Image (cartoon, grey):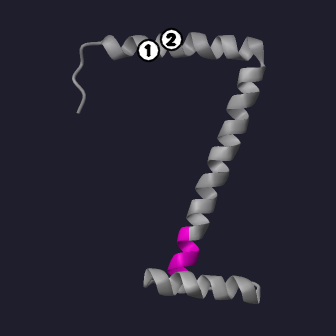
Amino acid sequence: MPATTVRISTKGHALLRQLATSQEASMSEVLDQALETYRRQKFLEEAGLAYEALRNDARAWTKHVAEMSTWETTLGDGLKGR
């Protein structure tokens, strides 16, 4: 796998090494996992803010609720799930 160099603080490096040791993983693996977790966290935060903005817009919220109620009728379509 191609690699690159990233500068981190001495404190961050020590923490990364400690986590890698405790997880019996490489520092690169721990860093990759941490970055993926952070990416997911930011995605959910942004989705939450967008949903909050939608909820605060009465007209848009009404449209959203109407659309969701339309989709809810598909649950009674008689089709079996997987």
In this rendering, is residue 25 above or below 53? below
Q: Measured along the vertical axis of the image, is residue 49 above or below residue 78?
A: below
| Residue in the foreground of this view, choosing between 38 and 19 | 19
What residue appears at the point 62 percent right and 58 percent down from the top-left corner?
39
Q: Which quadrant of the view contains residue 31?
A: bottom right
Q: Is residue 11 magenta?
A: no
Per the image, label 1 sits on a secondary structure element best described as: helix
Number of marks drawn: 2
Type of amino acid under label 1: Glu
The overriding secondary structure of the stretch rendered in magenta is helix
Which residue shows up at 62% across the image and 53% down it?
41
The image position of residue 74, as x and y in percent, is 38, 15
Q: In the rendered image, which residue does mark 2 sit on?
A: 69
User: Which sits in the foreground, 66 or 38?
Assistant: 38
Closest to the observer, 77 or 49? 49
Left or right side of 72 for 52: right
Residue located 44% across and 14% down the image: 72
Task: Give residue 64's position: percent from left, percent from top.
Answer: 62, 17
Q: Mark 2 is on which residue type?
A: Ser
Contact (Cβ within 8 Å) of mark 1 with mark 2: yes
Name the residue located 70 percent from the left edge and 82 percent from the top edge.
12
Q: Secondary structure at mark 2?
A: helix
- Quadrant in the picture for residue 18: bottom right
Badge number at residue 72: 1
The answer to whether one can see residue 7 in this image is no
Q: Which residues are magenta?
A: 28-33
Which quadrant is home to the C terminus?
top left
Is residue 59 visible in this depiction of the protein?
yes
Vertical arrangement, residue 68 with respect to residue 38, above or below: above
